[in-house]
Image (cartoon, grey):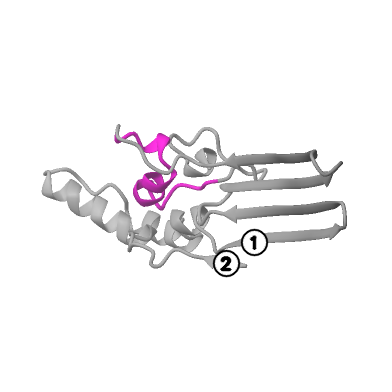
């Protein structure tokens, strides 16, 4: 068993600080504040979204192996199976693999031996978009978790991922 986790979350703005910086930027550009004090108070009470909390989690991975072997005067066998379930620290991302090997040897006579070696393997994976070279937020769950506004809600009123939110990292996972 292996446990993986994000070593450190990067500091990001909460809703209150985000609105303060938006107001400051507007005032520096000679425009009016974007948010009134009343809006800031009510939005702050509603909470803010830390997208890193939604994207990352502690991942538990597991590896298993079982081997059987034996022999009698005329034959040998070796049977082994393995399974690995590797979870990512990004939610809904994983890699699973398994295998089964059978080696069998039978002495048919002093001059003839039958050997059989077989192996079967299986792999499956799911991975969110973890990086990109284009700079488009919607194609990287990692970049989206750092850059999407803390004022946005990831889920709609039904509890489903909000498909109307442009670049919603929850949809990329």
**Could you say which is closer to the camera, residue 48 or residue 92?**
92
- Residue drawn at x 48%, y 60% is 47
Residue 56 seen from this side? yes
Q: Which mark is residue 62?
A: 1
Badge 2 crowding class, 10 Å Cα cut-off, few under 14, some 14 to 19, many 20 or more, is: few
In the rendered view, does 137 fall on the left or right side of 93?
left
Left or right of 103 on screen, residue 146? left
Magenta range is 135-154
Residue hosting label 2 = 2
Secondary element under disc 2, as helix, strand or loop, is: strand
Q: Nearer the viewer, residue 35 or 140?
A: 140
Residue beneath the point at 69% across and 60% down: 64
Q: Nearer the viewer, residue 33 or 155?
A: 155
First along the sequence among labels 2 and 1: 2
**Could you tell me residue 148's position as x and y percent?**
38, 46
Q: Residue 116: within the magenta?
A: no
Q: Could you classify mark 1 by the number of other residues whose Cα lies within 10 Å: few (under 14), some (14-19), or many (20 or more)?
A: few
Q: Is residue 61 above or below residue 128?
A: below
Count of numbered circles in the view: 2
Residue at image location 24% in from the left, 52% down from the top: 23
Quadrant containing the N terminus in the rendered view: bottom right
Cα separation, mark 2 vs mark 1, equals: 6 Å
């Amino acid at each position: 068993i292996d446990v993986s986790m994000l070593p450190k979350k990067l500091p990001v703005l909460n809703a209150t600080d985000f609105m303060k910086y938006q107001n400051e930027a507007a005032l520096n550009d000679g425009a009016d504040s974007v948010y009134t004090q009343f809006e800031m108070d009510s939005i702050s009470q509603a909470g803010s979204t830390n997208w890193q909390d939604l994207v990352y989690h502690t991942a538990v991975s597991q590896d298993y192996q079982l081997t059987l072997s034996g022999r009698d005067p005329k034959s040998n066998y070796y049977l082994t199976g393995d399974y690995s379930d590797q979870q990512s620290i990004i939610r809904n991302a994983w890699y699973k693999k398994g295998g089964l090997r059978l080696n069998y040897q039978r002495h048919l006579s002093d001059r003839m031996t039958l050997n059989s070696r077989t192996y079967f393997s299986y792999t499956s994976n799911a991975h969110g978009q973890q990086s990109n070279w284009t700079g488009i937020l919607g194609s990287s769950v990692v970049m989206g978790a750092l850059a999407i506004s803390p004022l946005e809600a990831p889920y709609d009123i039904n509890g489903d991922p909000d498909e109307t939110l442009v670049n919603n990292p929850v949809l990329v996972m």
